[in-house]
C-alpha cells in the first residue's frame, strides 16, 4: 500500500509540475506575441508617419523613385492619360520585372497626385537616387526620362525639370 501511495504521489507531483510548465509556456507565448504585436505597431506607426509627412519620403526603392520622377516630369501641367503610364512603364521595364514596374506605376501616380508639384518630387527623390545609383545609372535615368518624354506631349518646363534633376543627381548640367 505504501508503494502505491508513493507512486501516486510521484505521479501527482509530476502532473502538478507538468501543468505548471504548460501554464508558464502559455504565458511566455502570450508575452512573446504581445511583444511582436507591439513591435509591429511601432513599425507600422513609423511608416504611417513617414507616409503622412510625404509619400515621397517613404520611398526606399530606386526603381520606385525613378518611376515617380519620370512620371512627375512628363505628366506636369497636362492631362494624365494612359499614354503617360505606358511611356513610364516602357522606360522602367528594362530595369525591373513587369510586376514591379506595374507596382511602381501605381505608386508613382498616387505619390504625384498627393504632392502635385514636380520640383518637390525631384527634390525629395533625388537624394535616394544620388545615393543608390552610380554615374552610369544616373545618365541612364536621364535617358529614360527623355525616352518617356518622346512618347507623350510634355510641358514647356520639361527642359528646366531635366536640368534640375541632373543638378540634384550631381551630374554636369548642360
Image (tube, grey):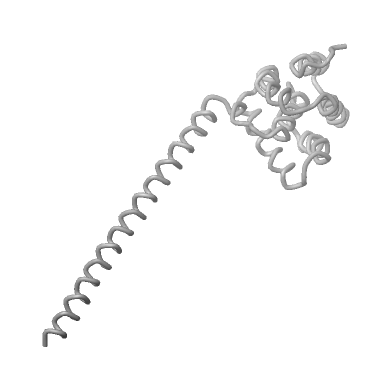
Q: Quadrant of the C terminus?
A: top right
Q: Quadrant of the N terminus?
A: bottom left
The answer to whether one can see residue 167 in this image is: yes
Give the left or right position of residue 39, taking residue 70 as reference. Answer: left
Residue 76 screen position, x and y as percent: 73, 22
Which residue lies most toward the left here? Answer: 1
Which residue is more in the foreground, 159 or 135? 135
- Identify whether 58 is placed above or below 97: above
Residue 61 screen position, x and y as percent: 68, 34
The answer to whether one can see residue 152 in this image is: no
Give the left or right position of residue 120, taking residue 167 as reference. Answer: left
Give the left or right position of residue 24, taking residue 122 as reference. Answer: left
Give the left or right position of residue 171, taking residue 31 as reference. Answer: right
In the image, what residue occupies the spot 73% across and 35% down?
A: 63
Residue 129 screen position, x and y as percent: 72, 26
In the image, what residue occupies the spot 72% across and 28% down?
A: 132
Q: Quadrant of residue 17?
A: bottom left
Q: Quadrant of residue 5?
A: bottom left
Which residue lies most toward the top here? Answer: 174
Query: Disc count in the image?
Result: 0
Residue 96 screen position, x and y as percent: 77, 42
- Identify whether 75 is placed above or below 36: above
In the image, what residue occupies the spot 70% across and 34% down?
A: 64
- Identify whether 168 is placed above or below 150: above
In the image, what residue occupies the spot 78% across and 33% down?
A: 84
Which residue lies most toward the front here? Answer: 3
Q: Quadrant of residue 158?
A: top right
- Identify whether 80 is placed above or below 159: below
Amino acid at each position: 500500500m505504501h508503494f502505491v501511495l508513493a507512486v501516486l504521489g510521484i505521479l501527482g507531483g509530476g502532473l502538478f509540475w507538468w501543468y505548471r510548465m504548460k501554464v508558464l509556456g502559455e504565458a511566455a507565448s502570450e508575452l512573446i506575441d504581445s511583444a511582436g504585436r507591439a513591435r509591429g505597431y511601432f513599425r507600422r506607426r513609423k511608416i504611417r508617419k513617414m507616409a503622412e509627412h510625404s509619400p515621397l519620403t517613404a520611398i526606399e526603392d530606386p526603381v520606385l523613385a525613378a518611376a515617380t520622377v519620370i512620371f512627375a516630369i512628363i505628366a506636369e501641367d497636362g492631362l494624365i492619360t494612359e499614354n503617360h503610364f505606358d511611356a513610364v512603364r516602357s522606360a522602367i521595364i528594362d530595369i525591373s520585372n513587369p510586376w514591379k514596374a506595374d507596382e511602381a506605376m501605381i505608386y508613382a501616380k498616387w505619390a504625384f497626385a498627393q504632392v502635385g508639384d514636380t520640383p518637390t518630387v525631384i527634390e525629395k527623390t533625388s537624394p535616394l537616387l544620388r545615393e543608390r545609383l552610380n554615374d552610369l545609372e544616373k545618365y541612364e535615368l536621364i535617358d529614360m526620362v527623355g525616352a518617356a518624354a518622346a512618347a507623350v506631349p510634355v510641358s514647356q518646363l520639361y527642359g528646366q525639370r531635366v536640368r534640375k534633376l541632373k543638378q540634384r543627381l550631381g551630374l554636369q548640367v548642360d
